[in-house]
Image (cartoon, rainbow, N blue to C red):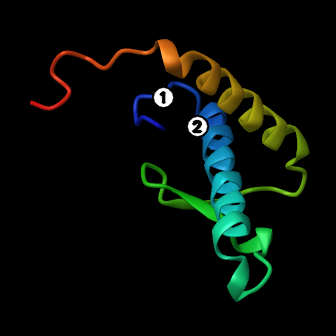
């Protein structure tokens, strides 16, 4: 999802924050039996800078963007065809 060649450190950090929000959303959806997920300890790791990137305090817009992207993918999925070399 995040490439080392990403030109903008700010853009890479924003992508990492989105990944951290996805971690939190996953924990909410699948790990709730063990307790309430704490967003303050949901991170993604920037391997290029060696930093943990938190989800951040205000995630409402980020969640809406994730949901919109998922809706677009779900809408396009029935018409998607796998590449010819998928199982090679």
Q: Give the number of marks.
A: 2
| Location of residue 18 in the rendering, given as x and y in whole percent from the top left corner | 68, 45
| Location of residue 60 in the rendering, given as x and y in whole percent from the top left corner | 90, 45
Q: Tag 1 or tag 2, which sits nearer the N-term?
A: 1
Q: Which residue is mark 1?
A: 6
Residue drawn at (63%, 60%), measured in percent from left and top? 23
- Residue furthest to the front: 78
**69 relative to 52 in the view: left or right:** right
Please tell me how crowded label 2 is: few (under 14), some (14-19), or many (20+) other residues with Cα within 10 Å. Answer: some
Q: Which residue is more in the foreground, 40 or 83? A: 83
Task: Indicate whether 60 appears above or below 82.
Answer: below
Q: CA distance from mark 2 to mark 1?
A: 7 Å
Q: Which residue is more in the foreground, 45 or 36? A: 36
Task: Indicate whether 21 appears above or below 64.
Answer: below
Classify residue 5 by image quadrant: top left
Please tell me how crowded label 1 is: few (under 14), some (14-19), or many (20+) other residues with Cα within 10 Å. Answer: few
Residue drawn at (62%, 39%), measured in percent from left and top? 15
Q: Which residue is mark 2?
A: 12
Residue drawn at (63%, 63%), measured in percent from left and top? 43
| Location of residue 74 in the rendering, given as x and y in whole percent from the top left corner | 61, 27
| Location of residue 71 in the rendering, given as x and y in whole percent from the top left corner | 70, 27
- Residue furthest to the left: 88
Indicate the quadrant containing the C terminus: top left, top right, bottom left or bottom right: top left
- Callout 2: SS: helix
**46 relative to 68 in the view: left or right:** left
Q: Which mark is residue 85?
A: none
Asked whether the residues under the numbered discs 2 and 1 touch, taking CB atoms below 8 Å apart as contact, a structural biologist would say yes
């Amino acid at each position: 999802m995040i490439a080392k060649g990403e030109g903008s450190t700010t853009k890479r950090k924003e992508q990492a924050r989105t990944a951290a929000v996805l971690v939190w959303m996953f924990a909410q959806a699948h790990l709730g039996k063990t307790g309430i997920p704490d967003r303050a300890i949901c991170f993604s790791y920037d391997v290029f800078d060696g930093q943990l990137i938190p989800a951040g305090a205000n995630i409402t817009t980020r969640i809406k963007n994730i949901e919109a992207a998922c809706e677009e993918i779900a809408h396009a999925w029935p018409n998607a065809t796998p590449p010819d070399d998928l199982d090679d």
